[in-house]
Amino acid sequence: MSDLIHLLKELIACPSVSPDDADCQKIIAERLARLGFECESMRFGDVDNLWARYGKHAPLVVFAGHTDVVPPGPIEDWTSLPFQPDIREGFLYGRGACDMKSAVAAMVIAAEKFVQQNPRFTGSLAFLITSDEEAAAIHGTRKVIEVLQARGEKIDYCIVGEPSSETHVGDQIRIGRRGSLHGHLTIHGKQGHVAHPHLAKNPIHLCLPALHEIAQTEWDKGNESFPFTTFQITNIHSGTGAANVIPGHLEVMFNFRFSTAVTVQELQQRTQDILHKHGLTFDLKWNVGGEPFLTQKGVLIAATQLAIQEVAGLDTRLSTGGGTSDGRFIAPTGAKVVELGVSHATAHQVNECVRVEDVKILVKIYERLLKILLR
């Protein structure tokens, strides 16, 4: 597996802070092209995407992932430099080691092994790799899917390499994700002097009861597949910076992570009803980050469970927890989607790392999964 670790180190050494790919996809494409994959670069805006396909027939199995990473934060907080991969006590350290260059490297190595051993397999194998997952996610997988649909390329099964495991690789897979709904609320008051509050309207004071009610509201109870919907305020800003001025406006950013037990329209309407009930004057802009999706039990889930059991000896748990992933753009096409990767324990953290042995196991699981789906 020395080739695996070499590739993973090579990818981590690329400072691919979103949306910069920093030549990761070039490294991947060169390896896949040598296998016989038809590699196509798709650049939208400042985002690089790679679509690489081997074969022309159904079923089409796709490995999906991203090469972009979040910023490393203060370099001095890292034990070793974030873009200089370092192995210590069985763990490989570096930004992206967990989320998700380990899975991308494992996918490439698994594909190499599978194609070399089965050059005339049934169906097709493809890679969908983007550099726009950690940031806006506008010009990445979403755009590639639009292109594929326009030319009639239909994905049957998709394995997303997000770090899905808890403690041991394969102990948990994601079979769906909650939806994400962002709100940008502006409360309008009236600016004035703090010594004359009767001549002003303080939007901070005015909004507090409404925000408290929204934060305490039970939006649903979830269902057998999803936990209940949650609401979180992420930013609040108001004021001129002066200590003696009542502000005229208050801006609040918030997010719903919602289940299939409630719709976007219901969340929007109920939120606005609470704001109106408290007599607020406001503007509210919405942005749907993604609808919830769920892969029902069937061929893909059964194959994934079997591959994990045979390779790792684990009875994997099925989960819909966590944040969003690019699976939200793939699932609406009718594709069956699962997320299978290493442990998410250090994702986005200082000293992000992955257990080397887990990446080796992941390669074997991916390879076995391909043999089941494309036998």
Image: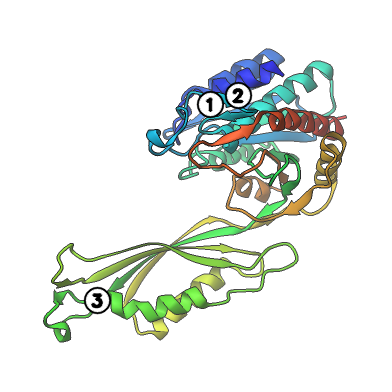
Tag 2 residue: 8
Mark 3 touches mark 2? (CB < 8 Å): no
Disc 3 crowd, CA 10 A, few/some/many (<14, 14-19, 20+): many
What residue is drawn where x is 64% and y is 21%? 5
Tag 1 residue: 12
| Visible residue check, residue 102 | yes
Indicate the amino acid at tag 3.
Answer: Gly
> Helix, strand, or loop for circle 3?
loop
Residue 124's disc is none
Q: Residue lying farthest top? A: 34
Q: Quadrant of the C terminus?
A: top right
Tell me how many marks there are. 3
What residue is drawn where x is 58% and y is 51%? 324
Q: In this view, does 177 lie above or below 88?
A: below
Indicate the amino acid at tag 2.
Answer: Leu
Mark 2 touches mark 1? (CB < 8 Å): yes
How far is mark 3 from mark 2, CA to CA? 54 Å
Image side of residue 45 versus residue 180, left or right: left
The image position of residue 341, as x and y in percent, is 68, 39
What residue is drawn where x is 58% and y is 24%? 87
> Helix, strand, or loop for circle 2?
helix
Nearest to N terminus: mark 3 or mark 1: 1
Looking at the rendering, which quadrant does residue 154 occupy? top right
Disc 2 crowd, CA 10 A, few/some/many (<14, 14-19, 20+): many
What residue is drawn where x is 84% and y is 37%? 307
Q: Which of 73 and 196 is in front in this view?
A: 73
Image side of residue 71 versus residue 190, left or right: right
Tag 3 residue: 189
Can you tell which of label 3 and label 2 is closer to the viewer? 2
Indicate the amino acid at tag 1.
Answer: Ile
> Helix, strand, or loop for circle 1?
helix
How far is mark 3 from mark 1, CA to CA? 49 Å
